[in-house]
Image (tube, helix red, strand yellow):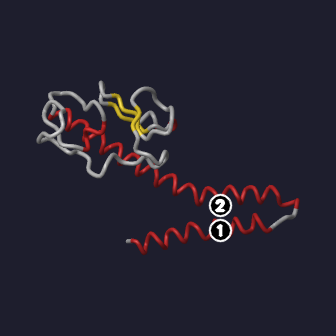
Amino acid sequence: MNRKLGLLGILIIIPAVIAIVVVTTNDDADTADTNERLKGLAETMVLGPIRKAKEVVLWNDLRTLRAHLELYKLQHHGTYPRTLDLLTQATDANGKPGGIYGPYVTGGLPVNPFTETNDVQTKTKGKGPQAWYYNARTGKIHPNNPEHMDR
């Protein structure tokens, strides 16, 4: 599997590198427009798959966190955890540490690949470098990225 991914990566990166070399070595003023198009193509070929991979990771982690929040609610008298950190430890039915429920998430909360942090924000959406926006009253969780807020 890794060998296939490596080959796929090479097939994606080599044309991009060739386009970058053409862009950077051709100084003819008549080809400036072509150079800009090639540069844009190269950036799309390299950065597009990286962004897509980050989105896949983000949505998988979000789906997992939402499932864990619902399980927590089911085991804790219909209430969501006050903080997402409670998902990383065992709690009793009242949400106090040291019980028989959980931990739901091991190894810490997942890192948002766009903010590169796993911090949680509870006050306002889309402000600061935090990974996740979480509303403990409603149990809603969203990635703290303006372009991904609506999911």
The C terminus, quarter of image: top left
| Residue under the image location 87 percent in, 64 percent down | 28
Q: How crowded is the residue under tag 2: few (<14 C-alpha within 10 Å), some, or many (20+)?
A: many
Q: Earlier in the sequence, mark 2 or mark 1?
A: 1
Amino acid type, residue under disc 1 in the picture: Val
Residue farthest along the right direction in this orientation: 29
Q: How crowded is the residue under tag 1: few (<14 C-alpha within 10 Å), some, or many (20+)?
A: some
Amino acid type, residue under disc 2 in the picture: Ala
Give the image location of residue 118, x and y in percent. 40, 44
Residue 144, placed above or below residue 47: above
Residue 73, placed above or below residue 57: above
Q: CA distance from mark 2 to mark 1?
A: 7 Å
Q: Which residue is mark 1?
A: 17
Q: Give the SS element for disc 2.
A: helix
Q: Nearer the viewer, residue 29 or 137?
A: 137
Residue farthest along the left direction in this orientation: 100
Q: Nearer the viewer, residue 145 or 124?
A: 124
In the image: residue 102, left or right of residue 1:
left
